[in-house]
Amino acid sequence: MNSKGFFNRKEEKTELSFWLSISDLMSSILIIFILLFVYKTINSIKAERLKENIIREITDTKENIIGKLKTDLANKNIQVDIDDKTGTIKIDEKILFEVDQYTLKPEGKEFLERVIPLYLRIFIENKKFMNRLDQIIIEGHSDDMGSYLYNMDLSQKRANEVFKYIYTTLADFSKTDREEIEKYITANGKSKANLIYKENGEVDRPKSRRVEIKFKLKDEEALDKIKKTLE
């Protein structure tokens, strides 16, 4: 028997076995990478669908609230400036206050008595809206005349006056509803931080002097971040 041929065949079998092992290993690694890719792709699709569902749910809720608010105000023949996108109610200074004053005028109180109960009932009478509600915010805003601190003091006092007067309108609600609403209402002065401008770029001072009543939904900040991510 040729010993040299025997050892050559043995080396060939060993080498073949080695390469088959490497091939099996590479195939296994490839399968693992494929599985990881598929897993990541599925999770990515799920994440995108989750984002879309969150956006749809919050957007639909906000649109429904705004639609309800507009309808109810129109039915009561109440004329008020409502932002179509945010649902923010903007009330001119002249309706509520005298210039540089923070005491509510009689007509201002009358206006709030008509608007506020209607506004609050939209949430109280709809559990879906209430469950999504994060805050109801009363904001005082000034124009660009005077110092920032002076305007901050005035805008905060005006927001507080509206905030306090809201409590007089809560007398018409049940104790349970009053306690529920109290969890959400806050009052903030914004000074001249959010001025309104004319088309020519000048500050619209009459419109800048205002009180806003706005609502904020849970996860709304997350929605804004998601929208920016998708953009």
Image: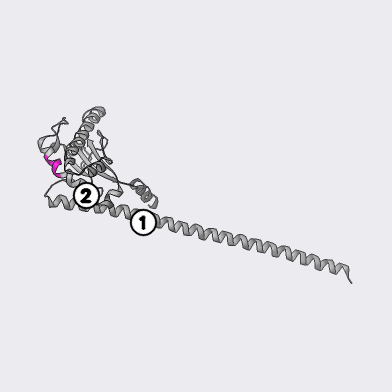
Within-10-Å neighbours for mark 2: few <14, some 14–19, many 20+: some
Q: Is residue 144 visible?
A: no
The correct choice, above or below, for 61 with respect to 139 in the image is below
In the image, farthest residue toward the right: 1
| Residue drawn at (38%, 50%) of the image | 226
Residue 172, position as x, y percentages in the image: 16, 43
| Residue drawn at (62%, 62%) of the image | 28
Residue 187, position as x, y percentages in the image: 25, 36
| Residue drawn at (19%, 46%) of the image | 119
Mark number for residue 53? 1
* Res 209 quadrant in image: top left
Q: How many marks?
A: 2
**What amino acid is found at the position of numbered circle 1 in the picture?**
Asn
Q: Secondary structure at mark 1?
A: helix
Magenta stretch: dominant secondary structure = helix
| Residue drawn at (23%, 30%) of the image | 151
Mark 1 against mark 2, which lies toward the viewer? 2
Within-10-Å neighbours for mark 1: few <14, some 14–19, many 20+: few
- Tell whether position 112 is magenta: yes
**What amino acid is found at the position of numbered circle 2 in the picture?**
Ile
Q: Earlier in the sequence, mark 1 or mark 2?
A: 1
Mark number for residue 153? none
Residue 168, position as x, y percentages in the image: 17, 38
* Res 182 quadrant in image: top left
Q: Which residue is mark 2?
A: 122
Residue 39, position as x, y percentages in the image: 51, 59
In the image, farthest residue toward the left: 106
- Tell whether position 74 is magenta: no
Q: Is residue 82 left or right of residue 135?
A: left
Magenta region: which residues? Answer: 110-114
Q: Is residue 174 visible?
A: yes
